[in-house]
Image (cartoon, grey):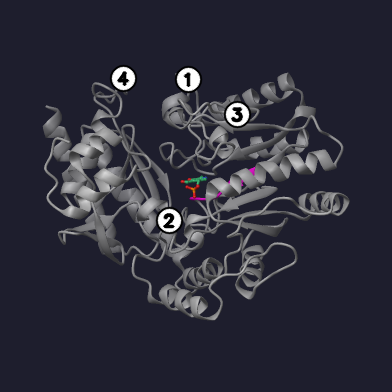
């Protein structure tokens, strides 16, 4: 260990843990940033320094970091029934009420809910449901998935296979399920020279169709996508893309799965990403803003048609042999219900649309900055891609170096962001107000100036 870590918590962290998404050897040298408390859109480290949580934790804390109503509901549910499961015909009130609430909020034909604790588990559950369903329907060959490069669908062995990011596959021996990753629908990076956005979308839909025909439509079970790709670099789809993909899915009897783990419950300024982009999925995955991450919870939401095929098979086999100890956990589902009530009562979806317009406009002004290649996003999620040369769009030195510099500079200025390669991702809590949007952009702008100076 190079650095003498001053506080014993930091020392214990470094000597006793392995952190997710962290270079472990670098962590041994630099130690952790220990976050101690939160208030609204702000969090504070153990030395008392304030940060705007520009990523809402992990894209998830819609209502801010100190919502007393969620604390009260969790505590009341803990006192009444801290745990009960949902296996073998058992049920408890919070999970029943939450399922009803979710079905009421999501677009038709989604009408059934299966709870898990994480987005990864939800996607694994979805994969198993799709396979189980197709076996039940007497089409055992229809098992393959279509996903996209740079997609993020989780890290468990099956959901991690759907994810299209090298760091999630390398040396983990993934993917292990039959999946084809199609071109990432990011216009700035992957459109051909001279191609319009509509032409780009049409090319990607044609690519998907060619893969379906090559594999055989009778072998392709589902297409999964985040309405707006988030963790891979905040990339909104080109206009017309989702309509083209949805039409293909209908044509070849392929299930369309919207992974709304980040987009869901207002992030884009509409209740769901599929509403924002105007397409209807057969299956939806939600998590994160479902509980504002105060409790771990996720859900697979699906149509009656999918349900009926599965239900008939459970009658034949005698059970649906899948479920988790914490499926529908009463404290998590009670917190989710209250969190969704707060999102509705305070019109946080409307706030995301209003504040999102201001955020996107203010970030757009940063396009003039010498380091900024592209500003993109929708509602309260944005990506600022940094380049060394706006014309060639080349990174500065090794890819990710500029992003890492801007990340550190932002933290120095009291702003927590995510650097995805050279893209700075922003995704603040949905409760953010106008003054705070301006404050966030000012801190980011200062950080970019610092990064530009370090670079030269
Ligand atoms: N799907 C999407 C779109 C996500 O962004 C994430 C996590 O960021 C996941 C799935 C996986 O969720 P979890 O980290 O809860 O397993």
Disc 2 versus disc 3: nearer the observer: 3
CA gap, disc 4 to disc 2? 34 Å
Q: At x 43% / y 56%, what residue is drawn?
A: 60
Task: Give me the disc on residue 392.
Answer: 4
Spot occupied by residue 134 in the image (x, y as percentages of width and height): 79, 39
- Judged from the image, the secondary structure of the residue bearing numbered disc 4 is loop
Tell me the mark number nearer the camera, choosing from 3 and 1: 3
Task: Give how far apart the Cα atoms at labels 3 and 1 are.
Answer: 31 Å
Mark 4 or mark 2, whichever is nearer to me: 2
Q: Earlier in the sequence, mark 1 or mark 4?
A: 1
The mark that comes first in sequence, 2 or 3, is 2
**Quadrant position of residue 124:** top right
Boundaries of the magenta span? 257-262
Q: Which residue is mark 2?
A: 60
Nearer the observer, 370 or 22: 22
Q: Residues within 10 Å of mark 4 (few under 14, many from 20)?
A: few
Give the residue pinned by disc 3: 176
Q: Locate residue 412, reporting x and y percent.
A: 16, 47
Q: Which residue is mark 1?
A: 192
């Amino acid at each position: 260990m190079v650095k003498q870590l001053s506080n014993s918590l930091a020392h214990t962290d470094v000597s006793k843990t392995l952190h997710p998404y962290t270079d472990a050897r670098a962590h041994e040298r630099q130690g952790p940033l220990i976050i101690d408390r939160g208030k609204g859109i702000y969090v504070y480290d153990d030395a008392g320094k304030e940060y705007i949580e520009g990523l809402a934790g992990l894209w998830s804390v819609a209502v801010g970091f100190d919502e007393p109503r969620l604390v009260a509901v969790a505590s009341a549910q803990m006192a009444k029934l801290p745990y009960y499961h949902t296996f073998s015909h058992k049920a408890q009130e919070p999970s029943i009420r939450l399922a009803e609430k979710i079905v009421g909020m999501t677009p038709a034909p989604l009408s059934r809910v299966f709870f898990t604790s994480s987005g990864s588990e939800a996607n694994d559950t979805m994969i198993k449901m799709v396979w189980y369903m197709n076996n039940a329907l007497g089409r055992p060959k229809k098992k393959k998935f279509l996903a996209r490069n740079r997609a993020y669908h989780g890290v468990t062995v099956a959901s991690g296979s759907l994810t299209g990011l090298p760091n999630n596959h390398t040396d983990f021996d993934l993917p292990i399920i039959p999946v084809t990753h199609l071109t990432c629908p990011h216009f700035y990076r992957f459109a051909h020279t001279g191609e319009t956005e509509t032409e780009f979308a049409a090319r990607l839909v044609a690519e998907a169709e060619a893969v379906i025909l090559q594999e055989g439509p009778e072998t392709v079970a589902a297409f999964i996508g985040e309405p707006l790709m988030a963790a891979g670099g905040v990339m909104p789809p080109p206009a017309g893309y989702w309509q083209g993909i949805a039409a293909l899915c209908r044509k070849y009897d392929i299930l369309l799965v919207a992974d709304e783990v980040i987009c869901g419950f207002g992030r884009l300024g509409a209740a769901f990403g599929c509403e924002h982009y105007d397409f209807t999925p057969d299956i939806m995955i939600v998590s994160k803003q479902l509980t504002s991450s105060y409790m771990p919870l996720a859900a697979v939401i699906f149509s009656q048609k999918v349900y009926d095929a599965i239900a008939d098979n459970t009658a034949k086999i005698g059970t649906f042999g899948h479920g988790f100890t914490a499926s529908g956990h009463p404290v998590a589902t009670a917190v989710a219900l209250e969190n969704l009530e707060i999102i509705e009562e305070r019109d946080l979806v409307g706030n995301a649309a209003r504040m999102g317009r201001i955020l996107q406009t203010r970030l757009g002004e940063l396009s003039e900055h010498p380091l900024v290649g592209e500003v993109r996003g929708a509602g309260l999620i944005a990506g600022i891609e940094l380049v060394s040369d706006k014309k060639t769009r080349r990174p500065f030195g090794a890819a990710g170096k500029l992003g890492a510099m801007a990340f550190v500079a932002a933290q120095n200025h009291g702003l927590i962001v995510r650097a995805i390669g050279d893209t700075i991702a922003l995704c603040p809590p949905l409760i953010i107000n106008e003054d705070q949007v301006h404050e966030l952009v000012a801190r980011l702008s200062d950080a970019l100036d610092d990064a530009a100076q370090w670079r030269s």
